[in-house]
Image (spheres, grey):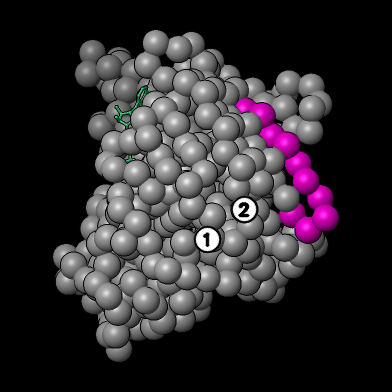
Amino acid sequence: MYVSHLSLLDFRSYEAADVELEPGPNAFVGRNGRGKTNLVEALGYVATLGSHRVANDAPLIRAGAQRAVVRTRVVRGERASTVELEITAGKANRARVNRGQLGRARDVLGILRTVLFAPEDLALVKGDPEGRRRFLDQLVVQLLPRAAGVLADYERVIRQRSALLKSLRGHRAAGRSPDLSALEVWDARAAQLGGQVLAWRIALVRAAQPLLAAAYEQVSDADGEARMTYRSSVLPDGLVPGNEELEKLLAAAIEEQRPQEIERGQSLVGPHRDDLALALGGLPAKGYASHGESWSMALALRLATFRLLGGGVDPIETDGVFWDPDHGSDADPVLVLDDVFAELDTRRRERLAELVVPARQVLVTAAVPQDVPGELMGARFEVTPGQVRRA
Ligand SMILES: Nc1ncnc2c1ncn2[C@@H]1O[C@H](COP(=O)(O)OP(=O)(O)O)[C@@H](O)[C@H]1O
Ligand SMILES: [Mg+2]
């Protein structure tokens, strides 16, 4: 698929911008702080309903404006879809698909798929588990749009359950014996939704693992194998339980942790506490990998994602959960390389350019034209504050 048109209204630094894009490579060149990342962030938002830079929507709306609008035209095979997304801070976002009624933002999921690689991705390797959980969940949602509702419900249940745990802790501190019946209702919801989230993440990691190993080999000179493993305190080592078992395992773990949970006023088990372990040559990437290896790992994660979304998922490997019958047709996600070439040495630069050139559409941003490899120059745009012009 590819994006043929993008227009922004009051999104980040853009009051109004209109860009006609081409299939194949597109390069956006402009000095730092001019709005290159803002532009690609808007596309990422249409694909995932989230930003790779911020956890809430407020910064996406131009300072002083009430709401932002992102409009895109996505071409997949013979079909073109238009998506219009309205972002309002503190209120539910709304969307319109193909000039239909304004409806739920979630209705746009599945229309555009993007994979973005940016220097911030180094945090996937070196940073906290939260970033890796978000990475997994954004991928789950791109593969299976209906997962967005379950993920949101799970987050809400954990928030409310934690609030209840805090109040129970208060009761206990005041010498009253807490009434646990309300908690049991939340426990059951947390286990049910959490078990589903676990099942998706595990299926995803299992399907992505061979793609990650292959991608790492392609982008790095090192011989060590790259591995990703899902880490959850409720998973027995080496076992891959089915969906129902996951719910039961989680329910049992929640019950077992209850005294500590009340004591701390927090939900201590479940997918919101899990991690994605990344390893190189048998050692954890975090804390062991060199700077260059960490870069290669982050890049390999994104390339693996690109291939996974582009049809590399085998329905058997994922128990069929992510299988979309339309998957193979022009499914390549839009690949975005935001300011990455400047950070790479010549060899990695050449290798990366070679790997991504065949993609259906690649958007590259750079501060200076010399940082865009020749074969990725394609359609060229100049980014100046608030404006994007075809050069
Ligand atoms: N909500 C917002 N309202 C107005 N300006 C914003 C907003 N968010 C970011 N900016 C501005 O956008 C610029 C950064 O744009 P960015 O796309 O990150 O630059 P780069 O070209 O380096 O990728 C900064 O000048 C910042 O002040
Ligand atoms: Mg930038």
Horizontally, residue 331 falls left or right of residue 299, namely right
CA gap, disc 2 and disc 1: 8 Å
Residue 170 on image: x %, y % = 27, 17
Can see residue 183? Answer: no
Instruction: Determine whether the residue tagged by mark 2 lies in a helix, strand or loop.
Output: loop
Q: Which residue is drawn at 46% across and 81% down?
A: 214
Residue 197 on image: x %, y % = 55, 49
The image's mark for residue 378 is 1
387, 182: nearer the viewer: 387
Up-down relation of residue 274 to residue 272 (above or below): below
Instruction: Determine whether the residue tagged by mark 1 lies in a helix, strand or loop.
Output: loop
Q: Which residue is drawn at 72% across and 63% down?
A: 330
Place residue 72 in its image quadrant: top right
Q: Residue at x 76, y 64 (%)?
A: 329
In the picture as drawn, the residue positioned furthest to the front comes out as: 391
Horizontally, residue 325 falls left or right of residue 190, namely right
Part of the protein shown in magenta = 76-85
Up-down relation of residue 199 to residue 344 (above or below): above
Q: Mark 2 points at which residue?
A: 22
Horizontally, residue 345 falls left or right of residue 5, namely left
- Amino acid carrying label 1: it is Gly
306, 235: nearer the viewer: 306
**Quarter in which the N terminus is drawn:** bottom right
